[in-house]
Amino acid sequence: MPAGPPAESAGSAGTAAAPQNPLAIVRTRGYVAVLVISALLGVPISAAAFGFLALVSELQTLLYDDLPQAAGFHGTPDWWAIPLLGVAGILVALTIRHLPGGGGHKPAEGLKTGGTPSVAAVPGVVLAALASLSLGVVLGPEAPLIALGGGLAVGAVKLLKRDAPPSALAVIGAAGSFAAISELLGSPLVGAFLLMEATGLGGPMMGVVLVPGLLSAGVGSLTFTGLGTWTGLGTYSLALTHVPPAGRPTLVEFAWAILAGALAALLGEAIRRTSLTLQDLVERHRLPLTALMGAAVAVIALLYAVITDQPATGVLFSGEDALGPLLAHNTTYTAATLTVLLVCKSLAYCASLSAFRGGPVFPALFVGATGGLALSHLPGLGTTAGFAIGIGAMAVAMLKLPMTSVLLASLLLGAEGLDVMPLVIVAVVVSYVATLRLARGPAAPHGAEPDPAMPPV
């Protein structure tokens, strides 16, 4: 097996580590073995990811459509989510408390993908995510899939070669994560950029680590597509079926993009700080407060339904499946309704981030899209342009991944995305810089020298 990413450039004693030669690594037999293993693992891991998404979808239908009908209701009552999300809180709390890995990473702390995936954590990650996503929590499946893919890949390698070096396990684990989310975000390329930015890949070793992941993602994408066609279930991929024409950007729309970026940064930081504060409270009393946060999500959805006469499911769930209808039927939403939806989805997102397990990506996209559509009711901003800049600005505010945010907002719109891409870039840059300015973080050590590669600010 080849060596993985280089070690830190300086140890605790200040001695520089010997740089690795990417060309020498690629020429080894071990690197070829890593490529072959990554390609082979792409099939079963993407199949497992497809099965996970299919199970979540079937459980959502069972619990929110079939069960109310079996109970004698005509349609799903708006209060129906309250007991379900209370149960979700109990299940997730028990999983976090009793299974290894704590049910996966804490979504309030962002999208974390660093380190070698843990095989032992996979059961807890899957159970916590199933309980969260199936019962209506406002989180997405991307983080559990990343952990699932990486954990399964590492487990498979350990079965084949128990003495595999940690560097090889890290590279193949990353390839497993690439395969697991290969089609989730609409394109293997977007998933690759997401993982590349989230893990901080860079420098001369980036290609060495990235190529096995891209190969695994390509195989995984083909597997997802094949399984979707064979089963008739689709690929569970982020997609829009109807996108209104965008037209060429105008100066007024550039001004709106700047404003949208600033507003998204403020909203994103408010969501982050609130969810982290609630997370501290929940961790002190895990079982009762996780159930309470679940019930709070359901009550917020109920309030939205009462105020707007729209279904409560508009607030529940990740928002992935609701993005397309939101854009396609945007004319049926008034500015007031969109504003209420924005507030309620953001509050439910906060509560979900604080206590449950899942990913932060899709709710951020939905919140941004809703805000962008609300702004498009004002003069000078088109519907598609508002939708796109809202998605990009909110995605980077919550994820702090600028390239991924631009790609998500642009590629999602297909051909129209090329027209609005300049607006998206402006919104993402403004939101990213404002988010970093607003973020609370540890201060630099006293007397630390500034990075010589960066100009003074």
Image: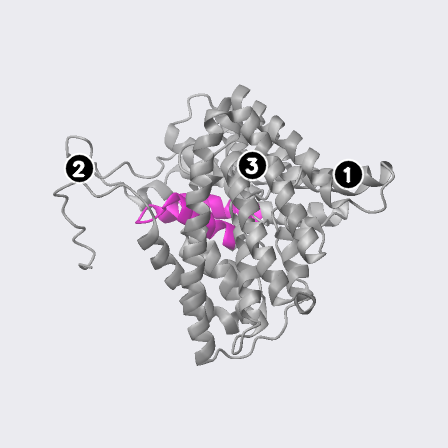
Under circle 3, the secondary element is helix
Q: Position of residue 293 (x, y in %)?
A: 57, 35
Here the colouring is one colour
Residue 430 position by quadrant: bottom left
Residue 62 numbered tag: 1
Question: Real-space Cα distance between discs 1 and 2?
Answer: 57 Å
Where are the magenta residues, as a range? 190-219
Instruction: Between label 1 and label 2, give the one nearer the viewer.
Output: 1
Residue under the image location 70 percent in, 33 percent down: 83
- The answer to whether 261 is drawn above or below residue 104 in the figure is below
Q: Position of residue 7 (x, y in %)?
A: 28, 36
Q: Magenta-highlighted stretch: main secondary structure?
A: helix
Tell which circle, 1 or 2, labels the residue nearer the N-terminal end.
2
Residue 175 numbered tag: none
Tell which circle, 3 or 1, labels the residue nearer the N-terminal end.
3
Question: Marks 1 and 2: CB-CB under 8 Å?
Answer: no
- The answer to whether 436 is drawn above or below residue 173 in the figure is below
Under circle 1, the secondary element is helix
Residue under the image location 46 percent in, 25 percent down: 284
Query: Which residue matches tag 2?
Result: 16
Tell which circle, 2 or 3, labels the residue nearer the N-terminal end.
2
Say whether residue 90 is left or right of residue 2: right
Amino acid residing under circle 2: Ala
Amino acid residing under circle 3: Leu
Amino acid residing under circle 1: Leu
